[in-house]
């Protein structure tokens, strides 16, 4: 993740999306970043059938056009309401109303505008795959076209004072750690890197790796207050207490869904994190270049 210059908020015109948009606008004000918002108008099966079978006088294209205009008007009003809530008068948000496949449309636009992060609201404390809304977030993540920031329902951003990141003490995470350190320089606190050891995990091995990483990043720890922390216990309890125990406003994980289990001995890491976390979670896009470097590093050790 580089400096945040370009933010895209995905809106489904629901409560979670309202909160995500408020977060995105606030984040944009904090970073002096451009904020865009996209809403995808879903095709109406009835209109598609009418258009296909030439039933009725109304054209399918007209129905989509009307739905887009209604969405544009509603989002414009929502943005005005959020601006008043934040006490900033007016905010400039670039609205994009499109039709097509939901997750593909959102992430294709994110790639087109080179968004540093795509923000979407999720249901706090619920199973990640419970609803179509949270399935959308998962689909967006799996497309791997931009960083995806999940905002739990009910969370309101005031400022980001403490960044946190999950790590597994792997050599390929060194670049990720450096980028996190540089990004956290915008705050008064050094980033906290969390490694989770569950009850049946190898705590002694983790402690040995912790010492190695502390030696590797000794200068950064001294100069920027970087911390490497081992948390033990059930993953749900650890994740649930991140904000209260460590004051973390934003947790970041480097890998995508199929890799999430590498950060703990649990194979249900992703589900447990989403069910339990009470603060925003960013899933950091792994680029093809990074993937190639990781593969090459692994091949050296074969």
Image (cartoon, grey):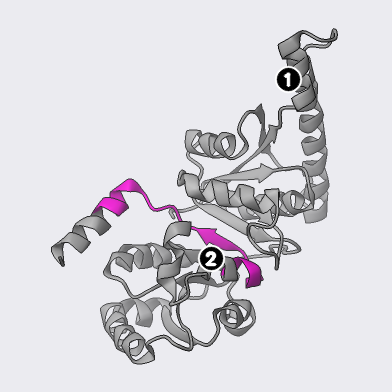
Relative to 53, 101 lies left or right: left
- Mark yes or no: residue 187 visible: no
**Can you give x and y, in whole percent of width and height, for residue 235 in the image?**
54, 79
SS for tag 2?
helix
Q: Quadrant of the C terminus?
A: bottom left
For label 1, count other residues whose C-alpha is less than 10 Å away and answer few (under 14), some (14-19) or many (20+): some
Q: Residue furthest bottom?
A: 204
Q: Residue at x 24, y 56 (%)?
A: 295
Mark on residue 130? none
- Mark yes or no: residue 164 visible: yes
Mark on residue 270? 2
**Can you give x and y, in whole percent of width and height, for residue 176 in the image?**
37, 63
Q: Is residue 149 above or below residue 242?
A: above
Q: Residue at x 68, y 39 (%)?
A: 92
**Can you give x and y, in whole percent of width and height, for residue 134 in the image?**
66, 53
For label 2, count other residues whose C-alpha is less than 10 Å away and answer few (under 14), some (14-19) or many (20+): some
Q: Is residue 11 above or below residue 127?
A: above
Residues drawn in magenta = 273-292
Foreground residue, 75 or 5?
A: 75
**Is residue 175 in the magenta section?**
no
SS for tag 1?
helix
**Mark 1 = which residue?**
48
């Amino acid at each position: 993740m580089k400096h945040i210059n370009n933010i895209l908020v995905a809106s489904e015109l629901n409560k979670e999306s309202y909160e995500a948009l408020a977060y995105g606008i606030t984040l944009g004000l904090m970073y002096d970043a451009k904020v865009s918002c996209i809403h995808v108008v879903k095709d109406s099966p009835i209109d598609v059938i009418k258009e296909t079978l030439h039933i009725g006088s109304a054209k399918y294209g007209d129905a989509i056009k009307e739905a887009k205009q209604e969405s544009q008007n509603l989002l414009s009003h929502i943005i005005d309401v959020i601006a008043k809530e934040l006490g900033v008068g007016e905010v400039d948000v670039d609205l994009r109303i499109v039709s097509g496949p939901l997750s593909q449309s959102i992430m294709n636009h994110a790639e087109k505008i080179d968004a540093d992060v795509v923000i979407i609201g999720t249901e706090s404390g619920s199973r990640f795959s419970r609803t179509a809304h949270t399935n959308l977030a998962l689909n967006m993540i799996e497309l791997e076209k931009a960083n995806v920031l999940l905002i739990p329902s009910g969370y309101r951003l005031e400022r980001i004072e403490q960044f946190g990141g999950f790590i597994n003490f792997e050599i390929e995470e060194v670049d990720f750690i450096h980028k996190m350190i540089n990004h956290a320089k915008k705050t008064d606190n050094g980033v906290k890197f969390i490694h989770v050891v569950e009850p049946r995990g190898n705590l002694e091995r983790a402690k040995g790796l912790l010492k190695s990483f502390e030696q590797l990043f000794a200068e950064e720890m001294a100069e920027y207050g970087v911390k490497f922390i081992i948390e033990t216990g059930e993953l749900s309890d650890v994740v649930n207490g991140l904000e209260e125990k460590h004051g973390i406003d934003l947790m970041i994980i480097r890998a995508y869904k199929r890799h999430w289990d590498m950060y703990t001995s649990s194979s249900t890491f992703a589900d447990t994190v989403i069910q339990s976390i009470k603060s925003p979670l960013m899933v950091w896009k792994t680029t093809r270049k990074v993937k190639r470097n990781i593969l090459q590093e692994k091949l050296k050790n074969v």
